[in-house]
Amino acid sequence: MNTDQFLARLACPVVPVVVVEQVAHAVPLAEALFSGGVSALEITLRTEIGLEAMGAIKAAFPDQLVGAGTVLNREQFRSAIDRGADFIVSPGAADALFDTAAKYELPFLPGAVTGSEIMTALDRGYRTLKFFPAEASGGAAAIKAFSGPFGDLTFMPTGGITPDNLATYLSVNSVVAVGGSWLTPRGLLREGQWEAIYQLAREAVEMCASLRSEVQQ
C-alpha cells in the first residue's frame, strides 16, 4: 500500500491522533473510534506503551488502518512495522529516518513546516507531508501559501485542529486529511468513557460528510 492508496481508504479525512497511557484501554478505545466511523488511527509513541498499544489494536482489528505516530528514529520505525503498522507518521524527518523509510513499502508521512524541510522531503520523493504543529506554524493560511511554490504537494496537518477550524483546513485544496487529538481527550481516556469517544467520532464523520456535500453542491 502506498500513500495514495492509504488516503483513498479514508472515508472521512480525519485521523484520530491517540496517546494511550494504559494498554488495557487500547482495544476498547479503538473499537469506539472505528464504530464511530473513522477509517484510520494514529497511535503515537509518546508513551512507553505506545508500540504495545498499537500492536494490540492491529491484532484486534487486522482489517483496519492502524499506524504509528511521533516516530523519531529508525529503531522506532522498525519496531512499529514489526508490530503491524500500516503507516508511519513523524513530526519531522532526518536523513536516518528517510533512509529507513526507503527500505519499506508502506506510507510514510514526514513532517515539514518550512520551505527547506519541504524541499528536503520533495528531494526524497515525498509528495504528502505532515504539517505539525499546524496552528502554531501558521495554520491553514500557511499551508495555502505553500501551494504557490509547491503546487503538487499535499498535507495532513496536525496540532491545534478542532471542530471549530476543521472546515477551514479541509477547504484548502492541498489538505488531504487532518490529524485530530480532540477525538480522544485525556480525561475521557483515563475514565474509560468509550461511549463519549464514540460520539466524538460520529460527530467528526458527520461533519466530514456535511462538508463534502457542501463542496459538491
Image (tube, helix red, strand yellow):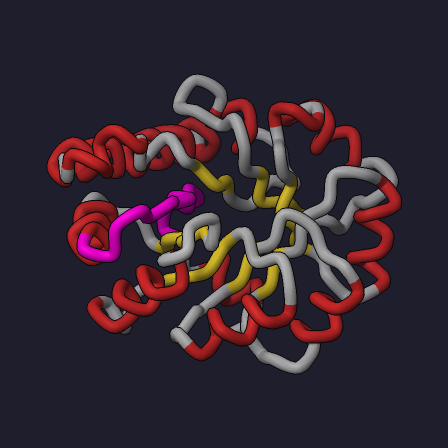
Q: How many marks?
A: 0
Residue 55 against residue 34 in the figure, above or below: below
Seen from this angle, which residue lies furthest bottom? 103
Residue 193 against residue 139 in the figure, above or below: below
Depth check: give the residue in front, 31 or 97. Answer: 97
Left or right: 128 as drawn, with respect to 196: right
Q: Quadrant of the C terminus?
A: top left
Position in image of residue 167 (x %, y %):
48, 25
Q: Residue at x 35, y 62 (%)?
A: 54
Position in image of residue 189 (x %, y %):
23, 38
Q: Residue at x 18, y 39 (%)?
A: 198
Q: Is residue 18 magenta?
A: yes
Q: Residue at x 65, y 24 (%)?
A: 136
Q: Is residue 113 magenta?
A: no
Position in image of residue 31 (x %, y %):
18, 53
Quarter holding residue 82: bottom left
Depth check: give the residue in front, 102 or 75. Answer: 75
Seen from this angle, which residue lies furthest top? 164
Quarter holding residue 78: bottom right
Q: Residue at x 18, y 55 (%)?
A: 24
Q: Which residues are magenta?
A: 10-24
Left or right: 173 as drawn, with respect to 85: right
Depth check: give the residue in front, 151 or 158. Answer: 158
Residue 43 against residue 5 in the figure, above or below: above
Residue 10 against residue 59 in the figure, above or below: above
Position in image of residue 12 (x %, y %):
37, 45
Left or right: 144 as drawn, with respect to 80: right
Q: Is residue 35 among what the camera can see?
A: no
Q: Is residue 33 among what the camera can see?
A: yes
